[in-house]
Image (cartoon, rainbow, N blue to C red):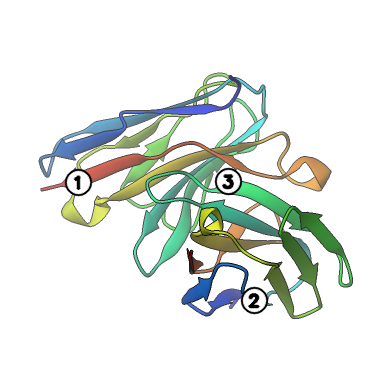
Amino acid sequence: EDQVTQSPEALRLQEGESSSLNCSYTVSGLRGLFWYRQDPGKGPEFLFTLYSAGEEKEKERLKATLTKKESFLHITAPKPEDSATYLCAVEMNAGNMLTFGGGTRLMVKP
Amino acid sequence: IAGITQAPTSQILAAGRRMTLRCTQDMRHNAMYWYRQDLGLGLRLIHYSNTAGTTGKGEVPDGYSVSRANTDDFPLTLASAVPSQTSVYFCASSEEAGGAQETQYFGPGTRLLVL
């Protein structure tokens, strides 16, 4: 069965304390991996798409990387406004359905 | 501002009642999706539509129906609501179903409580 697992479930950081979120997947034929940010009471907001192992994408303090088994979302020198739940999702070769992980709730304290 | 709108924002519904959640996008995207988000279960796909006139079942379709009469609108109907359908419902769209234009963009959600 295709699965997407995110860890940790929750992460507390001090402002400026860099860290990484993990998204591991067991799917047959990865078509693409997506990262989203979700603020409380809002819909998920698209961040990145990664298509092949070794690919990296950056946006401000965030960098996403992809291997054959997992993806990391690296947060460098986070600020309180980076506090949110970060979701990853995978799309398989078979179609355009996304399978989502449970998310990582990030809290950045000033 | 281009994007996805959902209505209502929130709703309290008596069990057994019929309810339609509305979703409209103005990006001329071909593909549209309905998800539900529950604590501990994440986002799960209910139904999808790859193009106007076609629909398909997702992971959790039972108790829900959809239609896609045109490109912009994708309503989700609960024919007879049950308490287990209490959830937050998100509509999403993508330029195409698959390929380089498959990134899905989400609406603000509808919070539904079925009593």
- Is label 3 or label 1 in front? 3
Marks 1 and 2 sit apart, C-alpha to C-alpha, by 37 Å
Front one among B80 and A49: A49
Left or right: where does residue B76 sit relative to residue B107? left
Where residue A59 sits in the image (x, y, percent)?
75, 52
Front one among A36 and B115: A36
Q: Return the chain for callout 1.
A: B
In the rendered structure, find residue A72 and report the number of the disc placed on it.
Answer: none
- Is label 2 or label 3 in front? 2
Marks 2 and 3 sit apart, C-alpha to C-alpha, by 21 Å
Type of the residue with mark 1 = Leu
Query: Mark 3 = which residue?
Result: A45
Type of the residue with mark 3 = Glu
- Is label 1 or label 2 in front? 2
Q: Return the chain for callout 2.
A: A
Front one among A49 and B18: A49
In the rendered structure, find residue A19 and report the number of the disc placed on it.
Answer: 2
Query: Mark 1 = which residue?
Result: B113
Image height check: is B6 above or below A17? above
State the SS at label 3.
strand
Q: Return the chain for callout 3.
A: A
Marks 3 and 1 sit apart, C-alpha to C-alpha, by 24 Å
Task: Report crowding for label 1: few under 14, some 14 to 19, many 20 or more residues within 10 A (C-alpha).
Answer: some
Task: Report crowding for label 3: few under 14, some 14 to 19, many 20 or more residues within 10 A (C-alpha).
Answer: some
